Amino acid sequence: MARFEAALARASTGFVPREHAEAIARACETASFDATKLANDARRAGTLAIPFVRELTAQVPPGAARYVHFGATSQDVIDTAVVLCLKEAAPRVLALARRLGDAAAQLAERHRDTPTVARTLLQPATPVPFGWKAAVWLSLLARAHEAFRRAADDACVLQFGGAAGTLAAFGSHAETISAALASELRLRNPPIPWHSARDGFARFGAEAAILAGAAGKIARDVSLLMQPEVGEVFEPSGAGRGGSSALPHKRNPAASLLALEASQRTPALAATLLANLTPEHERGLGQWQGQWFTLKSLLCATASALAAMAETLEGLEVRADAMRANLERTQGLVFSEAVSLRLAQALGKPAAHALTEKLCARAVQEGKHLRDIMQRNDEVLKILPAAELDALFDPKRAFGSAQQMIERALATWRGTAP
Amino acid sequence: MARFEAALARASTGFVPREHAEAIARACETASFDATKLANDARRAGTLAIPFVRELTAQVPPGAARYVHFGATSQDVIDTAVVLCLKEAAPRVLALARRLGDAAAQLAERHRDTPTVARTLLQPATPVPFGWKAAVWLSLLARAHEAFRRAADDACVLQFGGAAGTLAAFGSHAETISAALASELRLRNPPIPWHSARDGFARFGAEAAILAGAAGKIARDVSLLMQPEVGEVFEPSGAGRGGSSALPHKRNPAASLLALEASQRTPALAATLLANLTPEHERGLGQWQGQWFTLKSLLCATASALAAMAETLEGLEVRADAMRANLERTQGLVFSEAVSLRLAQALGKPAAHALTEKLCARAVQEGKHLRDIMQRNDEVLKILPAAELDALFDPKRAFGSAQQMIERALATWRGTAP
Amino acid sequence: MARFEAALARASTGFVPREHAEAIARACETASFDATKLANDARRAGTLAIPFVRELTAQVPPGAARYVHFGATSQDVIDTAVVLCLKEAAPRVLALARRLGDAAAQLAERHRDTPTVARTLLQPATPVPFGWKAAVWLSLLARAHEAFRRAADDACVLQFGGAAGTLAAFGSHAETISAALASELRLRNPPIPWHSARDGFARFGAEAAILAGAAGKIARDVSLLMQPEVGEVFEPSGAGRGGSSALPHKRNPAASLLALEASQRTPALAATLLANLTPEHERGLGQWQGQWFTLKSLLCATASALAAMAETLEGLEVRADAMRANLERTQGLVFSEAVSLRLAQALGKPAAHALTEKLCARAVQEGKHLRDIMQRNDEVLKILPAAELDALFDPKRAFGSAQQMIERALATWRGTAP
Amino acid sequence: MARFEAALARASTGFVPREHAEAIARACETASFDATKLANDARRAGTLAIPFVRELTAQVPPGAARYVHFGATSQDVIDTAVVLCLKEAAPRVLALARRLGDAAAQLAERHRDTPTVARTLLQPATPVPFGWKAAVWLSLLARAHEAFRRAADDACVLQFGGAAGTLAAFGSHAETISAALASELRLRNPPIPWHSARDGFARFGAEAAILAGAAGKIARDVSLLMQPEVGEVFEPSGAGRGGSSALPHKRNPAASLLALEASQRTPALAATLLANLTPEHERGLGQWQGQWFTLKSLLCATASALAAMAETLEGLEVRADAMRANLERTQGLVFSEAVSLRLAQALGKPAAHALTEKLCARAVQEGKHLRDIMQRNDEVLKILPAAELDALFDPKRAFGSAQQMIERALATWRGTAP
């Protein structure tokens, strides 16, 4: 808020005598405030701006005092102060998102040939490269990073309109002062004030929730893969990480927990901002006044989620052996699509699907590998020479277009502006 | 959290040597913590409980140290600490709600005969006593106060289950210790832990949002009535209240603003708690871990809203003259229901409705009072002797059952437990 | 809506000539409407009530027509119509909740001795009876069932106030007609109308979301337990259940999916109702007008979730052998609390925790059972005779207070009103 | 869904025999379904896709049947079907937004010199042109229109991955078939499937809520301006519009009501989509399965809001005389900023603000015009010659930068892609 008042004084130089403008700007740099008193007075005033300006004015030389906050209104200083905070917060959030994306990209590259099992509805589906799984994460991050950056740019706009929004206090100087103020604060100068057109924060909030959700998505997968019954990846270990206060043997997904915690709070916070779009007339009752609380909670949650997962993916333990073992444990069932499709070449899809279902059921029932069941099935052997069977159960032959998809996801990520 | 650990030590006396239990309890009273270090370690651990217990243990005499947090788990201490906070917060919120309700009750009584105009869809409808309007507020507060109290009672329950929830660490002592712990903390002891059955906080959060909404409803009406074009009530004035940083003449609805601000943030916060009901297995990833953030924001918002409106209604300026003037300004149109109903006795509802519509349209068009239009209308005069006309335009005769409704609302409020 | 108008006519008998009241009531039973026309006219009118009453009136004998909707307002008929729908929907939802609770109770009883592993943060924690897990579900359902029933009762209240809420049209007949109308419709008659005091629907919506969340919680656990890597329970199978359009071998948690889908939509729907608490004056713009859409979506989602899980728990396949095998696969690590506590009797908690951590680490590292590691550890053998070791690894001895908790949860459920 | 299956068959030509592909595509055009049976079977299957494909297959010639849905999975057909609906809905929503924006632009132009009073916190602030108020609406619409269009483009992407997302069923044909399918359906082909990366719908949902909010903002202002105590604008009248079922004289803001109703439901619906970002692994449980319900409610609400306000602004009655009268009724108080600023040239801001506050208070107290008070105040007269006083109270001299702002808002709107 003090930065706004300082910049306003400087931008008004000419309109305001230079020495007074400078005196105000200097006072803004050193002014101190009694936070508790401000808070109490703010409740009475209905806005923090009034006691803030009063306290600031008291710290300005008498001659200059008359020019403090000149021509501005409460919402100008508060909205712009929020924007100045967002402008510093956004690059820090983006840097965390980039770290997370870079780590996902590295996993996508490194594990482009590491077979693991895709899981749909929590059931093993077909073999995929673990790198492909990371590439799906990456594709989400690439879009979310890009869109958050754009939304942050769009939200970081000067708010400056004076009493009702028309800058009436400045007469013919208004346009010049407005431009100078934007320039002082390195903010964009909007075509018309947005006091009561609050889509910028709403859009920004939604994108923050999406970024948190992207971290949450990765956390969901990591925490599920860390189940000891699955055991395919592990968060990095180290002193103080993921222990239990009751159970010495546990290795908890502590970072994933943080990301999931945050991603569960962000959608509703974003909804609050989306519900603030209908203020009354030129300055509403209760919408903009609460947005800094909500934006703060939202950005802290997003940063928490991204930081936790960046650290996690950067040090992720990937157990290729466990992945392969889990593939094996499905007794060939995850190759049932390959089997069904191969049989369909001869039988058509419905018949092949039905036959494969029967073969799978038998494999499950007898606790045998699907390949073994097929080797003893006459219907199958009429279509498939035994020699061809093994190839059907090679994970890498079942990767489909995974490699091309990984390449494209990596290329998209590399093409994302920093 | 320290209160929990102290109470646990005391409750475990017998199972834990008395002198050690006492030593722990004493340490809990004086222990000090490095909040920043705790926060950083908590992120690594995934929970504040682990570093907290470690720091606490370091401040306990060596012999007793082995018994700190004995048999409990992280979630026990954190959930119960939240409950202990709620237990202190809830009566303070209720006291604010009671103040607000008492002030509404006083308005309902005092203004049971003060005519004002009811407004539906922001249009004047029919005359009602202003006290009846306050009685509607009161009816909402009575239900919300009662339900919040019940939800707070239901949520303020001990959480104590140990590693997985079965209190396995205490063997046959478990039931005794659990009961003693509940008694120490003056909390109810649940039939079975609620680690992963989190309806209590969800219900409590919803009721907090409803109480905030009740304050918001009153704020909505007060702020609309304070429009200078309406000018029927005013928030209490006084130094530092409701001024404007740009416009000296303004008298802003500063308290209503606070209540509306709060009531616009609470629904989404409550939704976050409602979305926390599906944790994984016996201790979920991310649901309970974030609830203290959300509950804190929620209760502060609710208290803010109630406090603002309690102060407002306690000092509300009611302008009976302005109310009457606004009734007059409708040129009798707000009596159109009375007119229509009276005419319907002769013409039936559809014909009466149509005739009244025509009369009203003429009143609007000619800028005349409806009574004057009627006095010159033959169709009307055939039905209604001119002498009867005046009575149709007496606000108090148009109050319907308002008095009985006010009485019942007051009785309900008086019957609400404190 | 027709039921309301019929009941209103009957309740007004005396005030309205009997034969006309009867004629209206009869017309209401047979009246037919052009839904598309109603919808289009409703948009123009801003409410469905106006074209509805017009169409209805056209189907009433001329003499009676004048009395249709007499003394009521749009919101009276719409709110009460919603209430009449809720009143029929609520018992159906409750019946589903009861089925689900009964099935959970049966599992709690039947499996009170079936050892399974509790999982905290998706990691195995300690042995518990599977019935205890079901008892936690049950405790949630018992509270949610009770609270939903109460909220439904509280929401199913007549709305009847006329133009502004004071029943001014009826003069001294108002109280009698209002009571008769409530009685006709078997609804409670409130002390004062709730046109603009909409906590009842908000509270009801929150409880619907909680019930859906309770079903979602069970679905979360079932779907995680159905992972083939875990394989401890299965949804009932049968024709058309849980298959895959691409993968013949899959056994998808199709019912859990439905419950999770629903429980993810309900919190935000409930938030919409919580955000409807601040209508303007005596009839707001946009709050009550949309609540039927939201309530319908909400109740359908809740019913969907409950139905899916009732059917699931009623036919749940519980694999006690898989549970035991998973316990075994932890190589004794889930008994680490028992071990740590036993060692703490000699060493104190910190030293015991540290020693147990070391033993567990070795077990993990060497891929051996914790018991085997302990049998070869001198520090352990000094404290624990080898003969005592086996008992430490008996799941049933590690159940703690589980049995008592199950009993209490069952008793609570049985004590819940039907 | 049938369009997807038809396009898939055509895209697979070569891989699938041409005559069979054609047979499937033809069947898709004429196939009929038993909706109730589909719904019931869908519940058992956990997805509509399975019974749909089964019913469709039954309507395809035997030879071709084996190729129906070949290589695709349930989520492919359902997600893409949703996208195909969005693709048709989005331009219709945008067309409504354009109508609304065009109407706002026309108001901004036509009323660029019509004085009205800006209202902040529901209190008169300073004079502004009514066209400037419309220009603020327009600036919001311009951004919301642009962002919705982009979000719709980004969301309308083919979903096609087969069993796990890698298109494994098609071997080396996958890339070609995928491209052909996208081309058939005129959808973009993504670099990698988005089965479990659901930011597109989340972003689209947020923008739909923002557009609805933009309509809601205009509705909020119109409904407040339509209060008879204000009476500055009116929704277009006409048969069946805005009447009351109880009160013949009322002119309700029926269209604004519709827009406010919708804008109060959309934030929470958008939140549901934002909460769907963390599905499990390659196909989640419950997130994507419910999105079509939510998207449908959301888009219908947005369209309803936009249509209502487009019609409203196109026919808005603007009462310039009432605006001027309301300005007059403030007794010059809305010129207090101009007064204060003019006095500040001599006294400095604090002293001028204090003096102005005193003058205003006197004006209020004595019920006189501020100008009259000033004319009798010595302190004022020392600074301001009486001749200068009148100019201070000319609304048009108090417009500040309003004209330039209007120009820029119009230019931005005209620059928005259609």
Image (tube, coloured by chain):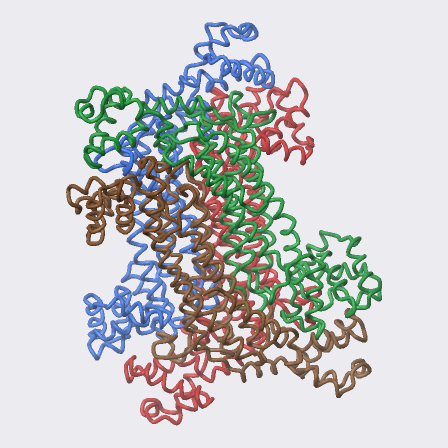
Chain colours: A green, B red, C blue, D brown
**Residue in front for this viewpoint, C162 or A358:** A358
Task: Using the image as rendered, state which of residue B203 and residue D54 is in the foreground.
Answer: D54
Is residue C281 visible in the rendered image? The answer is yes
Left or right of C323: which side holds D58? left
The relative height of residue B359 versus residue C89 in the rendered view (above or below) is below
* Relative horizontal placement of residue A173, taking residue D416 as reference (left or right): right
Quadrant of res C377:
top right
Q: Up-down: is C68 above or below B194?
A: below
Q: How many numbered badges does the structure rendering display?
A: 0
- Position of residue C269 measured from the top left corner of the image (x, y, whole percent): 41, 52
Q: Quadrant of residue D120?
A: bottom right
Residue, x 17% and y 44% (percent of image)? D58
Residue C223: x, y in percent?
Answer: 36, 34
Q: Residue at x 39, y 92 (%)?
A: B386
> To which quarter of the image does residue B319 belong?
bottom right
- Where residue B226 sits in the image (x, y, percent)? 57, 71
Task: Specify whether D246 is left or right of A67.
Answer: left
Quarter that holds the C terminus of chain A: top right
Q: Split into 4 quadrants, where in the image is the N terminus of chain A?
A: bottom right
User: Looking at the image, can residue B402 be seen?
Assistant: no
Residue at the image position 45 percent from the left and 90 percent from the top = B366
C295 shown above or below A314 = below
Q: Nearer the viewer, residue B203 or B312?
A: B203
Residue D114 at what x, y percent from top left?
A: 57, 81
